[in-house]
Amino acid sequence: MRSILIQAVVFLLIFNGVAMLREMSMLSTSDHVTPKPQQLKTITNEDILLQANGKQTIVYFFAPWCQVCNFSIENLQNVYQKTPDLNVIAVALDFVDVEEVKKFTTNHQLTFPVALGNEQVKANYKVMGYPSYYVLDEENTIISRSLGYSTEIGLYLRSF
């Protein structure tokens, strides 16, 4: 039993260490998002700014072909539905066409805005893998960030 416990602790330390190394390439917490927030089109052809608008906001970057994104996006949808004080903006990157993004959105029954990103957004937010997300406070300061799968509880805890 003691051996299993030691192995579990070592695994968790290695897992957290690797996660920290991967997140080092992202924008840092306490950074402000770009002074002039980027405006993108959503899949419904509306304009959206990547900013908080006075409400805690998760900006979630994904690719429709990403298997981890397919598993974790429902956790984000659940947090969004259960937390009225939270905005969510999903940003699709590295997609072939808009129909691919719309199909992803429909398959997961997403009710938050889904924006169509581009290489400039990807570079500005230092997105190196999927899914990546930033939690912004009301003044557009990054208070949390993550790269990879996040549970519903993990998303909630990072957001508040």
Image (tube, helix red, strand yellow):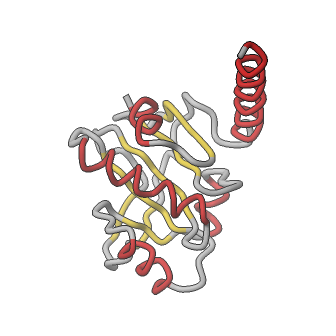
Front residue of this view, candidates 78 and 91: 78
Where does residue 45 sit, x and y in percent of width and height?
34, 79
Q: Residue at x 31, y 78 (%)?
A: 44
Q: Residue at x 64, y 40 (%)?
A: 27
Furthest residue in direction top, as rendered = 2
Where is residue 121, by image quadrant? bottom right
Front residue of this view, candidates 147 and 74: 74
**How many numbered marks are there?**
0
Where is residue 48, by image quadrant? bottom left
Where does residue 104 sit, x and y in percent of width and height?
45, 74
Furthest residue in direction front, as rendered = 1
**Is 95 rendered above or below residue 157?**
below
Front residue of this view, candidates 54 and 19: 19
Q: Residue at x 28, y 63 (%)?
A: 111
Question: Is the N terminus in the top left, top right, bottom left or bottom right quadrant?
Answer: top right
**Is 69 rendered above or below residue 64?**
above
Question: Is the C terminus in the top left, top right, bottom left or bottom right quadrant?
Answer: top left
Q: Is residue 141 left or right of residue 10?
A: left
Q: Is residue 6 left or right of residue 79?
A: right
Where does residue 136 sit, x and y in percent of width and height?
43, 38
Front residue of this view, candidates 16 and 93: 16
Q: Residue at x 49, y 54 (%)?
A: 72
